[in-house]
Amino acid sequence: MEPDGNSSKSEVAFERFPMIRVYKDGRVERFFGTDVVPPSTDTEAGVSSRDVTITVTTTATAATSGPPSHTVSARLFLPKLTEPQKLPLLIYFHGGGFFASSPFAAINHGYLNALVAEAKVVAVSVNYRKAPEHPIPAAYEDSWAAIQWAASHCDGDGPEAWLNDHADFGKVFLAGESSGANIAHNMATAAGNPELGLNIRLLGVALVQPFFWGSKPIGSEDLPPNRKADMDWLWPFVCPSKPDNDEPWINPVADGAPSLAGLGCGRVLVCVAEKDILRDRGWLYYEALGRSGWMGVVEIMETEGEGHGFHLFDRGSEKTKDLIRRLADFFNRDMPPLIS
């Protein structure tokens, strides 16, 4: 009997159910975050959105992981305005373990609507490339290119009218949750490197349940059941070129990691959740940043009784509203006089 020529198409090379399955022929199945909602005007929240395309080139990103140029999409959000005014600019990176989801998924779109409505910011939500088709550093390269694209509007003559007309480039923030918060941290680190030539100043960075990790367990990671083993696979999967869980991209407090004192922003807010496996890493980052010699102001907020991503899955809860209010306050405060 002849072998089935299509059998290899069904052979699984890697699986982490119910999240992702990779076949030997290169196909990838994702089990969450694949839905798409169109941009719209949310009359209840009073927020409009529209999509843009950003061209990424090696000149813009120093890209080493992909073709010389490609495009990245992003979704812009603008709150309802009663008069012309400039608003803080938020550049946002969604979560999904670096391998799933997008700004167009319903949970991310709805959350950004709520955040933009409360905070009264203009937001750019970046659809960076995903592993395993595009392993790290592709997500970092795309995110840096999106920041540079946003910065091209600082003189009011960029390609996107919403940013030209409404973004206050004296109040630029990065934010994200989970893997997106990891991106925000690494982008702030890049912004602190003058050789990269970012022509805007980052006022602050908000890290919501940031995905940091390490080879040695800390805090509750070492308690039964072995929660750490449930996470150890992820970084090597999305970053096979640097699979060590103490790589500074994923463990910014590892021995030999660049000093956090060079972080290129003036304020940082870390938000953790009590029942999140990543909680202790968020606290460790907060403590390490505070004693690093960085000349900024770091704050932390812990939400009791909640787990990872609660703010995405239960947007109507008071705890989610508290988190959004805290973020809105953060985005609408200037630096203290002695720091600015």
Image (tube, rainbow, N blue to C red):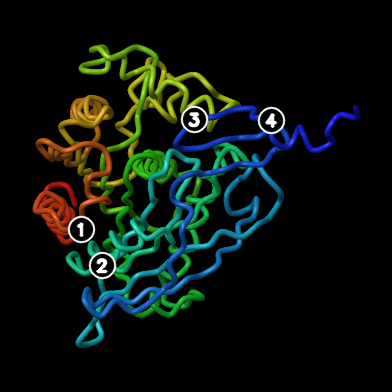
Residue receiving disc 1: 331
Pointer 3: what residue? 16
Residue 11: give its label.
Answer: 4
Per the model, the C-alpha gap separating discs 3 and 2 is 37 Å
Q: Position of residue 318 (x, y in %)?
A: 9, 53
Choose between 71 and 109: the one closer to the eye. 109
Mark 1 or mark 2: name the one nearer the start of the chain. Answer: 2
Q: Earlier in the sequence, mark 1 or mark 3?
A: 3
Locate residue 255: give its quadrant. top left
Q: Which residue appears at 22% of the width and 43% of the height?
A: 268
Mark 4 crowdedness (10 Å alpha carbons): few <14, some 14-19, many ≥20: few
Q: CA distance from mark 1 to mark 2?
A: 8 Å
Q: Amino acid at mark 4?
A: Glu
The amino acid type, in three-letter code, at marker 3 is Arg
> Residue at the spot x=36%, y=27% of the render?
252
Given residues 8 and 22, the one toward you in this image is 8
Residue 142 x, y percent position in the rendering: 53, 51
Which image quadrant is residue 138 in? top right
Q: Is residue 321 left or right of residue 224?
A: left
